[in-house]
Image: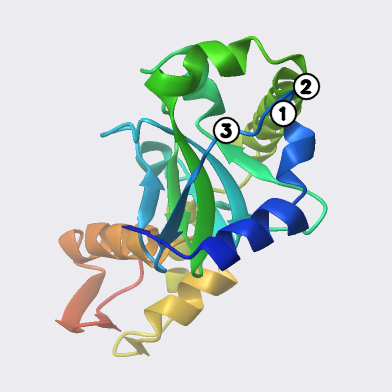
Amino acid sequence: METIHNHRLYDQYIESRQIRSLFSGELPRFLLLHYAPGDLLTTPLSPSGFLQLVVDGELLLYDMPDENSTVSIRTDFHRVNILGDMELLDMQFTTLFVEAKTDVYTLALYLEQHRQRLLADPIFLRCLCTSMAEKLNGAVMASNQMTLRQKVRLSLCHAEPGQRISGIAAIAESLNVSSRQLMRVLKEFCELGVLSHEKKGEYRVLKKPE
C-alpha cells in the first residue's frame, strides 16, 4: 500500500465517482491509497483502521479458513464499493480477506477520527446499509458453492500421475480465487502425497486423491 499525493488524480476520482453525493454537507478530506495486485486491503488478522471507498480496480473477497471461492468485485463507474463499513460499527468485525486483483485505488478515512460524523450522516448511512446488504447477499451465495478444496480435488481426480501443473495465476483466475488461496490448497495435497512441489509455481501429480 502507498499513499498517492496526486491532486489531479484525487480530484478526478472525487468527480468521476460522484463522491460528493455520498455525504451531507462538506466533503471529508480523504487519503488516496494505491494497492498493487496481491496486496491485502483488509484481513481478519489485522484491521486496517480505514473506511475506504474503492474508486478504481478489481478486488477478491474470500474467507480463508472456510476455503470458500472468492467473490470478485470490479469497480463500476456508477457504483462505489465500501470497505470498513462493518468495522465502522464494530472495530473487531473484520471477517474477510480483501485482496487487490488489479491495481486498486481507494479514498480512505481514518475510522476513529471520522466515526461520529459518519454515523450522524443520513445520506452516508443509506449508502452504508446498501453496502452491507450486498455483502450479506454475497456471503449467502458463496456459502452454497463448492469449496476450493473440492474443486481442486475434482480436477486432480481427472489428472494422470506424472502430469505437471503450472500457470498458478491463470488457474486461480479461472477458479475465481486468489493465487494465495490456490497455493494453500495445493500445499495440503502435497502434504497428503497427491502432489509434489517441483519448483516455484509448478507441481507434479503423484497419484489420484482418495
> In the picture provided, is 148 more to the left or to the right than 141?
left
Give the image quarter of residue 198. bottom left
Say which amino acid is labelled 2: Ile
Check disc 1 and report the residue beneath it: 23
Q: Secondary structure at mark 3?
A: loop
Q: Secondary structure at mark 2?
A: helix
Instruction: Work out whether residue 74 or residue 176 is closer to the camera in this orientation and state it.
Output: 74
Foreground label between 2 and 3 = 3
Q: Percent position (x, y) of residue 140?
A: 67, 31
Split into 4 quadrants, where in the image is the C terminus? bottom left
Give the image quarter of residue 206. bottom left
Check disc 3 and report the residue beneath it: 28
Say which amino acid is labelled 1: Phe
Question: Mark 2 vs mark 3: which is more N-terminal?
Answer: 3
Vertical side of 13 occupied by 166: above or below: below
Q: Percent position (x, y) of residue 69?
A: 53, 51
Instruction: Work out whether residue 122 or residue 72 is closer to the camera in this orientation and state it.
Output: 122
> In the picture provided, is 112 more to the left or to the right than 142?
left
Q: Percent position (x, y) of residue 88?
A: 49, 20
Label pair 3/1, CB-CB below 8 angstroms: yes
